[in-house]
Image (spheres, helix red, strand yellow):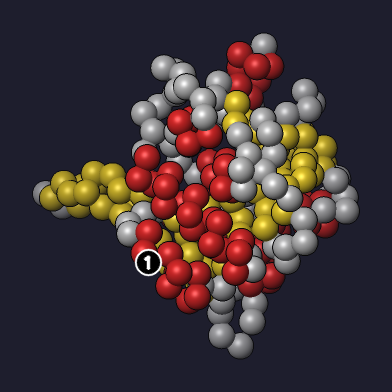
């Protein structure tokens, strides 16, 4: 059986190899390694022309919306907090359009960290631009692991069980859910940490970096859903 082709969003950033320093298409290797372990064939998707999106969607068996810089609040009608890193509007536009096209085509989607935010915004949802101000604590920005409650009937729950311990520092969170999305995992303060799109064969967003570490079960489930 041929491996499903899994596209992973990437970004442009300066990189050094040898004596060269040039702008490069970059992606942390954890994504490609996790997809490979799950039986998929990983390829990188650079944030270029919107006109290429239909071709990606037709050719790919699944799409991972990867992590990175927070989504520009201007996209969902909010002001940017000065504490948030400078946004990357070109990447935002490309990935939001890619997410919408993949969903429309029924292509499996896994949104990771920023990718969950992209998924939510693509479906008309909004974000909390600076989470510590909304919840009045800094626990979401901490690197220490903490336990999330997961809906056992969800795809995330079927892969991971009703509780999952994760480390996931983040400064933004979901506010209004996008059309068709439902919450399927929560922190102890009820901030949503995972979502799924109702009626889709696999469209999941998680706040944590599920591609890291030894637990590959959610990526396994995603790649299985992308199998021909």
Q: Quadrant of the N terminus?
A: bottom right
Residue at x-position 48% and y-position 76%? 59
The crowd level at tag 1 (other Cα within 10 Å; few <14, some 14-19, many 20+) is few
Q: Residue 81: x and y, percent?
A: 46, 19
Q: Looking at the picture, does residue 39 appear above or below residue 167?
A: below
Residue at x-position 73% and y-position 50%? 180
Asked whether 52 or 164 is in front, the reply is 52
Asked whether 45 or 52 is in front, the reply is 52
Q: Residue 184: x and y, percent?
A: 79, 44
- How many numbered badges does the structure rendering display? 1
Left or right of 103? Residue 66 is left
Asked whether 192 or 221 is in front, the reply is 192
Residue at x-position 53% and y-position 41%? 114
Label 1: which residue?
Answer: 52
* Visible residue check, residue 97: yes
Q: Residue 213: x and y, percent?
A: 60, 49
Quadrant of residue 43 within the rendered picture: bottom left
Q: Quadrant of the C terminus?
A: bottom right
Asked whether 195 or 164 is in front, the reply is 195
In this view, the residue farthest toward the bottom is 1
């Amino acid at each position: 059986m041929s491996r499903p082709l899994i596209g992973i969003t990437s970004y442009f950033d300066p990189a050094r190899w040898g004596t060269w320093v040039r702008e490069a298409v970059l992606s942390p290797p954890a994504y490609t390694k996790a997809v490979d372990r799950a039986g998929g064939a990983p390829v990188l998707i650079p944030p270029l022309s919107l006109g290429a999106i239909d071709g990606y969607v037709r050719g790919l068996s699944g799409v991972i919306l990867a992590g990175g810089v927070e989504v520009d609040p201007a996209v969902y009608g909010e002001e940017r907090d000065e504490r948030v890193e400078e946004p990357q509007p070109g990447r935002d536009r490309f990935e939001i359009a890619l997410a919408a096209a993949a969903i429309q085509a029924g292509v499996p989607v896994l949104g990771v960290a920023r990718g969950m935010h992209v998924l939510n915004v693509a479906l008309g949802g909004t974000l909390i631009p600076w989470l510590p101000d909304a919840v009045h604590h800094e626990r979401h920005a901490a690197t220490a692991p903490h336990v999330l409650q997961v809906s056992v009937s969800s795809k995330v729950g079927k892969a991971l069980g009703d509780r999952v311990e994760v480390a996931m520092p983040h400064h933004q969170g979901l506010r209004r859910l996008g059309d068709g999305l439902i919450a399927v995992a929560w922190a102890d303060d009820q901030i949503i940490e995972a979502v799924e799109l109702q009626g889709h064969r696999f469209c999941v967003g998680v706040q944590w970096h599920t591609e890291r570490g030894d637990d590959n079960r959610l990526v396994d489930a995603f790649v299985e859903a992308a199998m021909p």
